[in-house]
């Protein structure tokens, strides 16, 4: 049967399809080349560019935003240039109000109806109320109506908080040792005497008087006069000198 001229033979068409469609190749390079010929070079390039564009777009969307430039830069202090120089036009540095005052601390002895009697050191300018607060506050039996809570503390003084019916020493809140040095008219009760009252005893100074009161507060009332020997600073000679002048 004659085949019209100009038309491809069926065998030629099959051969052309075999060239365009990839088949089993003995080597991966030949197989890849066959896939490129079958898929088309232009479509392969377009697909690759689309994948790259999608990848870049996805990275741009999910990346962390860059911090603003002004947030990353350190801030300069604005107070150094505006602070007035000392001595200029009579101005003084804006320091603490306590700069011109004394910087010496105040040491006082807090005794009586407080939670934690003892010797405390407070900043200068402290009041009697500050000393009582430092000692844990007054107890429920404290009679604060007879105590001047607004009085300024003096170094080496005693703050005595009495209970109802208990006498307040006149020298409370005044530096110890300011009481008269003459002997007491009546025996001094070791279990209720203040530092000022004990300081009137012969051979007993402010430090020993404070030690007697501290021993009484920590160890309890004195049972006998001989218990004074347990107080630091009191030996047999000093005990003999005050034996007739004290009581329990």
Image (spheres, rainbow, N blue to C red):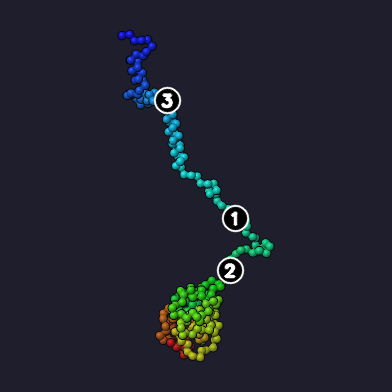
* In this rendering, the label closer to the viewer, 2 or 3: 3
Give the CA separation, mark 2 to mark 1. 26 Å
Q: Please say whether residue 70 is visible from this viewpoint.
A: yes
In the shown orientation, is residue 33 left or right of residue 68?
left
Report the residue marked by disc 1.
78
Q: Secondary structure at mark 3?
A: helix
Residue 149 percent location from the top left of the image = 52, 77
Q: Earlier in the sequence, mark 2 or mark 1?
A: 1
Chain-order first, disc 2 or disc 3: 3
Circles 2, 1 touching at the beta carbon (< 8 Å): no
Q: 10 Å neighbourhood of mark 2: few (<14), some, or many (≥20)? A: few
Which residue is pictured at 42% across the width and 33% down the height? 51
Is residue 191 rendered to the left or right of residue 28? right
- Residue that numbered label 2 is attached to: 98
Crowding at dot 1, Cα within 10 Å, few <14 / some 14-19 / many 20+, comes out as few
Total marks placed: 3
Q: Is residue 7 above or below residue 214?
A: above
Q: Is residue 208 above or below residue 244?
A: above
**Mark 3 highlights which residue?**
41
| SS label for mark 2 | helix
Q: Decide if residue 208 is in sight here.
A: no
In which quadrant of the rendered view does residue 78 lie?
Answer: bottom right
Depth order, front residue of 184/46: 46
Cα gap from disc 1 to disc 3, whole angstroms: 66 Å
């Amino acid at each position: 049967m004659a085949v019209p001229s100009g038309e491809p033979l069926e065998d030629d068409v099959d051969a052309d399809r075999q060239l365009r469609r990839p088949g089993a190749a003995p080597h991966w390079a030949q197989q890849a080349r066959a896939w490129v010929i079958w898929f088309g070079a232009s479509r392969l390039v377009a697909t690759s560019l689309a994948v790259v564009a999608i990848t870049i777009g996805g990275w741009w969307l999910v990346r962390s935003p860059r911090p603003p430039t002004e947030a990353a830069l350190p801030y300069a202090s604005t107070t150094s240039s505006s602070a007035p120089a000392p001595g200029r036009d009579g101005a003084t540095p804006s320091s603490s109000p306590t700069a011109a005052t004394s910087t010496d601390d105040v040491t006082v002895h807090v005794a009586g109806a407080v939670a934690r009697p003892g010797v405390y050191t407070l900043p200068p300018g402290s009041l009697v109320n500050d000393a009582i607060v430092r000692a844990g506050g007054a107890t429920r039996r404290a009679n604060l109506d007879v105590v001047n809570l607004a009085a300024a503390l003096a170094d080496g003084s005693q703050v005595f908080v009495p209970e109802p019916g208990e006498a307040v020493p006149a020298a409370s809140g005044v530096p110890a040792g300011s009481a008269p040095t003459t002997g007491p008219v009546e025996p001094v009760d070791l279990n209720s005497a203040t530092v000022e009252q004990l300081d009137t005893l012969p051979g007993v100074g402010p430090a020993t008087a404070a030690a007697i009161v501290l021993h009484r507060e920590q160890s309890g009332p004195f049972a006998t006069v001989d218990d004074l020997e347990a107080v630091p600073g009191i030996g047999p000679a000093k005990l003999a000198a005050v034996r007739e002048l004290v009581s329990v």
